[in-house]
Amino acid sequence: PDCSNHGTCVKGECQCESGWKSFDCSIGEGPIEVSCDNKARVINTQFTVQWNRPEKVGSVYDFIALYAHDAPNDQPYMYRYASNAEGQQTSGEVTLQLPSTPGQYEARYIDAFTRETVTLTGKILAHLPCPNDCSGHGMCARNIEIGRA
């Protein structure tokens, strides 16, 4: 075998380089990761979730979904596929939108075939906007107006 350019063939078997596995060294090793910035957001706003996965890990049907914290995997608010129609990607980002209800949410990377959570972002706090955008004299932080001097 050619060992997918990630290993050496020794007596008919691939000896994979570090970071690669499988009989032909075609599958990357390592975790699938998701992240997003700013874990406190105003309700009904969009945010971006970045994701990374090793080569040939996951499928074009895997998705990133937004859930109420501790909700079961069959109850997402919304989801976006973690690949495009052109094939499997190893990294990317998706845009999700928070619901109109304040609360704790999380974005999860879901394996499409098992419907299991592979990894998640941690809690995302959705809060109400501050009144009158703090009248232009402060900033809103978790539904608390902070005045500027």
Image (tube, helix red, strand yellow):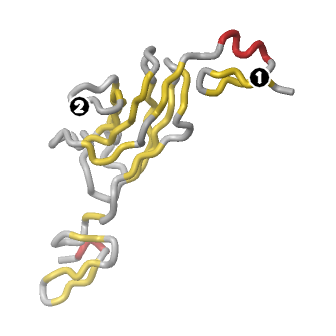
Coordinates of residue 149 in the picture (x, y in percent): 87, 27
**What numbered label is drawn on residue 138?**
1
Q: Quadrant of residue 27?
A: bottom left
- Identify which residue, 112 or 45, lies in the foreground: 45
Coordinates of residue 17 in the picture (x, y in percent): 31, 78
Marks 2/1: CA distance? 38 Å
Q: Residue at coordinates 32% horizontally, 59% vertically from top-left?
A: 55
Asked if labels 1 and 2 touch by Cβ distance under 8 angstroms, the answer is no
Q: Please determine whether, in this image, residue 141 is positioned above or below residue 49.
A: above
Element type where label 1 sits in the image: strand
Give the residue pinned by disc 2.
Answer: 72
Q: Amino acid at mark 2?
A: Pro
Q: Residues within 10 Å of mark 1 (few under 14, many from 20)?
A: some
Q: Please determine whether, in this image, residue 41 is positioned above or below residue 3.
A: above
Q: On the rendered structure, is 131 left or right of 49?
A: right
Q: On the rendered structure, is 140 left or right of 57?
A: right
Coordinates of residue 19 in the picture (x, y in percent): 33, 71
Q: Quadrant of residue 8?
A: bottom left
Q: Residues within 10 Å of mark 2 (few under 14, many from 20)?
A: few
Q: Quadrant of residue 132?
A: top right
- Identify which residue, 145 or 16, lies in the foreground: 145
Image quadrant containing the N terminus: bottom left
Q: Amino acid at mark 1?
A: Gly
Task: Farthest residue to the top: give it.
Answer: 132
Task: Farthest residue to the left: give it.
Answer: 12
Q: Please determine whether, in this image, residue 89 is positioned above or below residue 85.
A: below
Coordinates of residue 39 in the picture (x, y in percent): 52, 36
Q: Residue at coordinates 34% horizontally, 41% vertically from top-left?
A: 82
Q: Residue at coordinates 60% horizontally, 21% vertically from top-left?
A: 143
Q: Earlier in the sequence, mark 2 or mark 1?
A: 2
